[in-house]
Structure formats: C-alpha cells, structure tokens
C-alpha cells in the first residue's frame, strides 16, 4: 500500500496553558512508555477533505487547552526516570493520501501495511523533541478515511487516552465539553521521595518465567511473529463462562462470585497458548494482567484522572496444571492475581518503585531491541482488556467509525480483548504469537469450546 504524505502540521493549544516541569508518577514511568497506536476507519464523509482537516486542526488546538499535558515534551532526568515539561510545543497532525480503497482492507485484520497509516515516531530523535501525540488522517481513493493515532503511554493509559479522544471528538462536533481531565498527579505521589520500605514482596516486578533450560529470553525475542483477530460469539462466551464456573466449590471463598468474562476468556487464552506452544507439563508460565487501580485505592481517584493508574500483576502456574485441570483453575489463578491489587498493595508497589536506583529494567521500550525489559512472549502471555472501555462511536462530525482497533502489535504474547461492535456480548481477541505457533493456537482456541 502506497501512502503519500501531503502535509504536516504542528497543532498548539488555542490558548495559553500552564508551563513548567511536572512530575510523573511511578506508574507513568514503567511498562509501555513508548507510543501506542490505535486506528479508526470511516466511510466516505459528505464533508470536503479540506474542511475535515481544518476542523481537526481547530478542534485539536482547543482540546489541547484542558489536555495541555499532551502538548508538552518528556525529559529523561537520570536513573531511568522521566519528567513532563509543559511547554505547549504541540501535537503533530499529518495529512496523507492513498490509492487504496476501504474494500482492500477486507475485515481490517491488522497487518504490517498499517504502519503506513500511522505517523512515524523516530526514537532515534532525542526524547525531548518527540511529540506525545501524533495523528495521521489518510484519505483513500474511494473517499473513505482513516485516523491513525499514536499517544505516549508515559502520559496516559487506555482509559485516559479514550477520555481525550472523546472530548476532542465532542469539540469537533461543536458540542460542549464533558468531563474535564484531573491533572494533578500528586494524588499518586508523583515526585514524592520514598516514604517506607515496601510492605509486599512484589514478584510482579521480577522477570517472568523462562523456557526450561534457557538462561535468558534472547532467542525467543528474535523469532518471527504473526497476528490474528479471533471472534467469539455471545453463545461461545457464555459456554466458556459455564465451563469455568461449573466446578466451583462452596468452600472456596475466592469463587463465591462467578468468574467474570475477562477471567474466563483470559484463562481460556492462557490454556490454548500453552497447548499451541507444546509446553512440557513442568514448564512454568506467567500471565500478565493489567488492573485499573482507580477504584481500588482509598480514597478512589477522582473521575477523569488523567494519567496511568493501571498496574500489571502476574498469575503464574505450570502448563501441566493449566491443561489437566478445568478452565476454572486458570480463571482462579487470574482472580487471585487481580485481587492482590488493594490500596495497601498499590502504596507498597509505589514504595518499591520509588526505592529503585533505576527504573530502566521495568520499561518495555527496551524489550524488543535487546535483552533488557520484561518479556511476556514464550512461555508467557499478556492479556489486556478493553471489554469495559468506551472504545466505539468516535464521531468527529462525519459519522461514527466502521472499524476501530489496535495498531500493529508484533510482540509475541501481546493480546487484547475487545467487545464486538456488531453483536452485543460477543468478543474479539487480537493476539500476536510466534508464527510457528499461530495455526495450532487457532485450532485449539475453538476446538476446546466445541468439544465441551
């Protein structure tokens, strides 16, 4: 697919905004601190392309007034730590054209060609020169359009990014503002010195399991990966939930409440991945679970908290246990991990990170390019949930999208659960695995449902 860049704009806040350095919380500075891509496709709008780009520029400049953090720049301050400088340097908005048509994308399965629909983020450039928000509007030959966005994860998590996108679209449609962002990160102890030794062990910050007999994950990081989008109908989802909950014991206090859709589906993915990778029964395997702490800390974070408030915890088991025991076992291990995230746990984890001499080893930005950073590929997996996020219905004034999804993810073990936009209760799994394992995974993923 050939994409031609027609123009590039620096969009700055429409009004003067706060200036100066802002401390980031520990949760902003670990995990995925690079830019994260998302894409939206739209049918041909009635509006002329010039009017669309002018409206996007104008509405973005107004959106960057309350969300002025996204117009700033990050700075390394030593010891693997970052600060955000509020300097109104602005976001990047790119105009592009393509000779492709929307019909060429079929069911919009993410592919390497998607890279052309996103702004390029050049990490060879000094960090303090990189925009935190880059947007590319691509107009196709048929008149359809795509909006490819990439936003720095060091500034926002998924919930905050969607809040910004929703407000930007609202402004673009000419509607009054909804929820304003809560920008004070001191509520998450940003900038505070360590206050106490951690209360918990925090094994989640250690390296996840390695393949048996391996001393590191170097070879696994190099292997070719591929992506799949797998759909589960509402009936299939309900069948899996029934399978997970059918053997719950009344004496098991963690199982009084039925396993959730996320616990069930993630347990099924975990088991299917172990089977596809043909792990030995004694192979330890880790599952990274991303938990939103907004309502788990005391007091809860204010509505509209704009920043990272999600923690990655890890469920660990052996492949033999996962595959020989019912689905409810895998779901129970996931629930145990999720339920560790309490107010005390979050405070302890914050202290753990504040006491670290350097945060580099906790940052995913290093994971693909070397042996540093956490690696949740073989024999591990990470399953992120967008099941409860308002990811659909983004209307900038030319109608809602016909498809929304993640950008290209070529990281073994990277997976995402999304609600289906077309059928209530059905779910889409976007997953990246080593190419050698994908066909076996697809087969086992559906086979286990049919056989039960």
Image: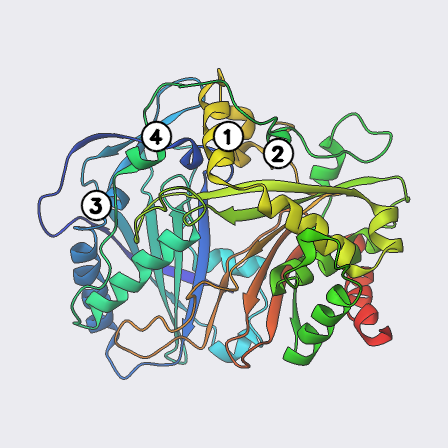
Local crowd at mark 3 within 10 Å, few (<14), some, or many (≥20)?
many
Residue sitting at 80 percent across and 64 percent down?
247
Mark 4 lies on a secondary structure that is loop
Q: Quadrant of residue 285?
A: top right
Mark 1 lies on a secondary structure that is helix
Q: Please say if 31 is above or below 167.
A: above
* Nearest to N terminus: mark 4 or mark 2: 4
Residue assigned mark 1 = 349
User: x and y percent of residue 243 in the render?
Assistant: 77, 68
* Nearest to N terminus: mark 1 or mark 3: 3
| 3D distance between C-alphas at marks 1 and 4 | 12 Å
Residue assigned mark 3 = 68
Mark 3 lies on a secondary structure that is helix
Residue occupying the far bottom of the picture: 46
Residue assigned mark 2 = 204
* Nearest to N terminus: mark 2 or mark 1: 2
Quadrant that contains the C terminus: bottom right
Local crowd at mark 4 within 10 Å, few (<14), some, or many (≥20)?
some
Tags 2 and 1 in contact by the CB under 8 Å rule? yes
| 3D distance between C-alphas at marks 4 and 2 | 20 Å
**Marker disc for residue 189:** 4
User: x and y percent of residue 162 in the render?
Assistant: 37, 58
Q: Please say if 160 is above or below 194.
A: below
Mark 2 lies on a secondary structure that is helix
**Which of label 2 and label 1 is nearer to you?**
1
Q: Is residue 6 visible?
A: no
């Amino acid at each position: 697919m050939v994409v031609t860049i027609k123009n590039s704009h620096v969009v700055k806040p429409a009004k003067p905004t706060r200036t100066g350095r802002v401390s980031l919380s520990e949760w902003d500075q670990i995990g995925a601190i690079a830019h994260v891509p998302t894409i939206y496709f739209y049918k041909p709008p009635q509006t002329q392309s010039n009017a669309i780009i002018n409206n996007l520029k104008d509405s973005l400049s107004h959106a960057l007034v309350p969300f002025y953090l996204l117009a700033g720049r990050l700075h390394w301050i030593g010891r693997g730590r970052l600060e955000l400088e509020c300097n109104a340097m602005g976001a990047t908005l790119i105009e592009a054209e393509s000779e492709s048509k929307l019909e060429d994308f079929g069911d919009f399965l993410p592919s390497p060609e998607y890279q052309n629909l996103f702004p390029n983020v050049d990490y060879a450039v000094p960090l303090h020169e990189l925009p935190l928000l880059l947007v590319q509007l691509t107009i196709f030959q048929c008149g359809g359009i795509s909006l490819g966005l990439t936003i720095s994860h060091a500034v926002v998590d998924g919930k905050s990014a969607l809040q910004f996108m929703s407000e930007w679209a609202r402004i673009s449609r000419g509607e009054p503002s909804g929820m304003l962002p809560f920008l004070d990160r001191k509520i998450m102890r940003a900038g505070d010195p360590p206050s106490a030794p951690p209360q918990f062990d925090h094994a989640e910050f250690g390296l996840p399991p390695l393949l048996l007999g391996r001393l590191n994950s170097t070879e696994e990081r190099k292997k070719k990966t591929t992506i799949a989008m797998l759909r589960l109908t509402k009936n299939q989802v309900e069948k899996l939930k029934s399978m997970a909950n059918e053997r719950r014991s009344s004496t098991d206090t963690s199982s009084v409440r039925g396993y959730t859709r996320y616990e069930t589906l993630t347990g099924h993915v975990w088991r299917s991945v172990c089977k596809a990778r043909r792990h030995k029964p004694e192979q330890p395997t880790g599952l990274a679970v991303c938990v939103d702490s907004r309502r788990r800390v005391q007091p809860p974070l204010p509505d509209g908290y704009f920043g990272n408030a999600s923690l990655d915890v890890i469920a660990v088991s052996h492949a033999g246990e996962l595959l020989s025991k019912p689905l409810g076992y895998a779901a129970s291990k996931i629930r145990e991990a999720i339920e560790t995230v309490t107010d005390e746990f979050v405070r302890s984890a914050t202290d753990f990170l504040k006491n670290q001499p350097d945060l580099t080893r906790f940052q995913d930005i290093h994971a693909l390019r070397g042996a540093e950073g956490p690696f949740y590929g073989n024999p591990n997996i990470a399953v992120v949930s967008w099941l409860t996020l308002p990811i659909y219905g983004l209307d900038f004034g030319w109608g809602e999208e016909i498809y929304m999804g993640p950008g290209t993810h070529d990281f073994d073990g990277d997976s995402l659960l999304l609600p289906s936009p077309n059928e209530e209760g059905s779910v889409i799994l976007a997953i990246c695995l080593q190419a050698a394992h994908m066909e076996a995974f697809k087969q086992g993923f559906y086979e286990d449902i049919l056989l039960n």
